[in-house]
Amino acid sequence: MEMTLRKAQSSDIGFLIELRDLTMRRYLEAVGMPTGREDYLQRVRYEFEHARIIECDGVAAGLFKAVYLTEQHQWYIFQIQIHPDYQNRKIGRQVIQSVIDQARTIGASVGLSVIKSNPAQRLYLRLGFKPVGESEAEYEMLLQPE
């Protein structure tokens, strides 16, 4: 299976709204966060210029959104969502690891937040992220440079 990333386009928004519903609804509901179409659209549009569609063999399989924050000397992962048909194939791990590798080359940290009920936090812990803060609904996690 060949995995590639391509820049998201406005024509991807329908897929991204569906993807958010499929991958996030139960976790959002568990912590009382909104799950309406407009809420999804707002999240999809946030930092959209940094959104990448994860494709597997040319088929849209997920979303990855990250940016390098110069002042913080940190890569920040805003979103990663893998369609259920493509989960448990190490796609998310591979994409996150590529950001970790980029960060290490410049001595930068990598940050992200995860909803407390989302089992993806186990992956983040295995990759070396540590909880550094929390809100009512989310953990803020950080991977320090080596």
Image (spheres, rainbow, N blue to C red):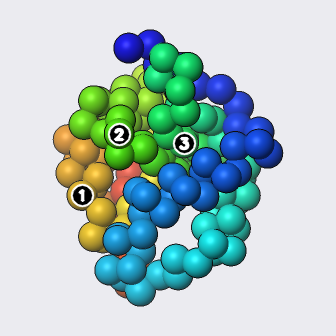
Which residue type does callout 1 highlight? Pro
Q: Nearer the viewer, mark 3 or mark 2?
A: 2
- Which residue, given by chain and number where applicable, does mark 3 sit on? 63
Between 58 and 47, the residue placed more toward the observer is 58
The answer to whether residue 119 is left or right of residue 28 is left
Q: Nearer the viewer, mark 2 or mark 1?
A: 2
**Residue 116: x percent and y percent?**
30, 70
- Which residue, given by chain and number where applicable, does mark 1 sit on? 119
Q: In percent of the image, x 60 and y 58: which residue is there?
A: 17
Give the quadrant of the C terminus.
Answer: top left
Say which mark, if any, is on residue 13. none
Which residue type does callout 2 highlight? Asp
> Helix, strand, or loop for circle 2?
helix
Q: In percent of the image, x 77 and y 42: which residue is there?
A: 11
Q: Which numbered disc, 1 or 3, marks the residue that appears first in the sequence?
A: 3
> Helix, strand, or loop for circle 3?
strand
- Which residue, given by chain and number where applicable, does mark 2 sit on? 85
Can you name the residue that lies furthest to the top here?
Answer: 2
Cα distance in 3D space between marks 2 and 1: 17 Å
> Helix, strand, or loop for circle 1?
loop
Cα distance in 3D space between marks 1 and 3: 17 Å
Q: In percent of the image, x 29 and y 52: which residue is there?
A: 120
Between 41 and 72, the residue placed more toward the observer is 41
**Residue 119: x percent and y percent?**
24, 58
